[in-house]
Image: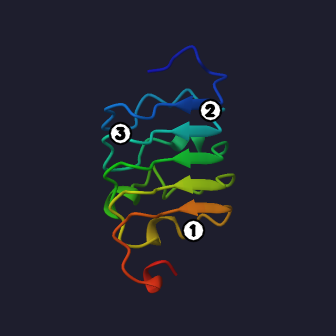
């Protein structure tokens, strides 16, 4: 729990051994979250950031389609999310985040996507 850091706007936690996103409920001003190169298999517990998150970096984890569909994760209606990096995960298509119309940058290189139809 990152209590006492209520004004935090950026959190960089790359290259650790994090298996689950937790303890962010008080970080309601968070704009940028970087959890690249960890041990994540799903995206969840981001309800407190639904109105503020602009950039989410999740590259080099083990996230698959099911893990990215969690209701407290990318299924949320992130109105300001413009950058999503899911490079080098285990995605087979983009259905879990097709509703994120504010995205301007989507990085999904190095996944298990086989055809252009899987991206439409």
Q: Could you tell which of marks 3 and 1 lies nearer the N-terminus? A: 3
Residue 34 relative to residue 6: left or right: left
Disc 3 and disc 1: Cα gap in Å?
26 Å
Pick the front one: 80 or 14: 14
For residue 99, the mark is 1
The residue positioned 45% from the left and 39% from the top of the image is: 35
The residue positioned 52% from the left and 43% from the top of the image is: 47
Residue 80 relative to residue 98: left or right: right
Residue 1 percent coordinates (x, y): 44, 21
Looking at this view, name the residue that lies furthest to the top: 4
Is disc 1 placed on a helix, strand or loop? loop
Asked which quadrant contains residue 8, the reply is: top right
Residue 41 percent coordinates (x, y): 30, 49
The residue positioned 55% from the left and 47% from the top of the image is: 56
Disc 3 and disc 2: Cα gap in Å?
23 Å
Looking at this view, name the residue that lies furthest to the front: 110
Pick the front one: 31 or 47: 31
Residue that badge 3 annotates: 38
Residue 46 relative to residue 110: left or right: right
Pick the front one: 118 or 25: 118
Pick the front one: 34 or 88: 88
Q: In this view, does 1 lie above or below 80?
A: above
Q: Nearer the viewer, mark 3 or mark 2?
A: 3
The colour scheme of the drawn protein is rainbow
Residue 50 percent coordinates (x, y): 60, 46
Q: How many marks?
A: 3
- Within 10 angstroms of label 3, few (less than 14), some, or many (20 or more) residues? some
Q: Is residue 65 above or below residue 63?
A: below
Find out whether the residues at labels 3 and 2 contact each other: C-beta distance under 8 Å.
Answer: no
For residue 28, the mark is 2
Disc 1 and disc 2: Cα gap in Å?
22 Å
């Amino acid at each position: 729990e990152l209590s006492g850091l209520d004004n935090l706007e950026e959190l960089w936690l790359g290259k650790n051994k994090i298996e689950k996103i937790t303890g962010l409920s008080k970080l309601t001003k968070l704009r940028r979250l970087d959890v690249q190169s960890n041990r994540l298999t799903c995206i969840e517990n981001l309800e407190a950031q639904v109105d503020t998150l602009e950039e989410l970096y999740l590259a080099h984890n083990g996230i698959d389609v099911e893990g990215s569909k969690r209701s407290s994760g990318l299924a949320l209606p992130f109105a300001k999310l413009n950058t999503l990096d899911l490079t080098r995960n285990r995605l087979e298509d983009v259905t879990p985040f097709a509703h994120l119309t504010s995205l301007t940058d989507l990085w999904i290189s190095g996944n298990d996507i086989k055809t252009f139809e899987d991206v439409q």
